[in-house]
Image: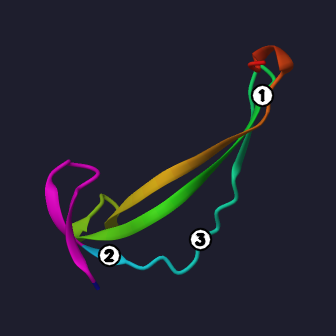
């Protein structure tokens, strides 16, 4: 596995970690209906997952970091909110 340094998500300190390959993602988009009548779709794009070396959370699970981005699309918006 590839090693790299990352910031621990809990403490903010720089720590050594190992890149862990993502084998499967169940990633349906999130669909939102807003009070103003708009409908949005948002999807998480996973870039990289790392496991922090030698650190565990309070339940004894390994600590992971996830680098990600998001895709947001406006599916529908009321005509009064649109620019003409």
Which circle, 3 or 1, is nearer the viewer? 1
Q: Residue at x 32, y 75 (%)?
A: 19
Residue displayed at 34% across by 64% down: 64
* Above or below 29: residue 26: below
Which residue is tagged 1? Answer: 38
The answer to whether the residues at label 3 and label 2 have Cβ atoms under 8 Å apart is no
- Percent across and percent down for residue 11 are 20, 48
Q: In the image, residue 15 lies at what x, y percent? A: 15, 62
Tell me what residue is drawn at x 45 percent, y 56 percent. 68
Q: Is residue 6 left or right of residue 31?
A: left
Q: In front here: 9 or 1?
A: 1
Question: Which stretch is magenta?
Answer: 2-17
Is 41 left, or right, of 65 in this rendering?
Answer: right
Q: Position of residue 57 (x, y in %)?
A: 30, 60
The disc placed on residue 25 is: 3
Q: Which mark, residue 19?
A: 2
Residue at horizontal 37 percent and vertical 77 percent from the top: 20
- Please say whether residue 5 is visible from this viewpoint: yes
Mark 1 vs mark 2, foreground winner is 1
């Amino acid at each position: 596995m590839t090693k790299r340094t990352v910031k621990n998500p809990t403490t903010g300190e720089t720590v050594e970690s190992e890149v862990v390959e993502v084998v499967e993602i169940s990633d349906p988009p999130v669909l939102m209906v807003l009070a103003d009548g708009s409908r949005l779709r948002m999807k998480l794009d996973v870039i990289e997952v790392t496991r922090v070396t030698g650190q565990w959370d309070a339940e004894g699970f390994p600590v992971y970091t996830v680098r990600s981005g998001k895709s947001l699309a406006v599916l529908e918006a009321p005509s009064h909110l649109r620019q003409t």
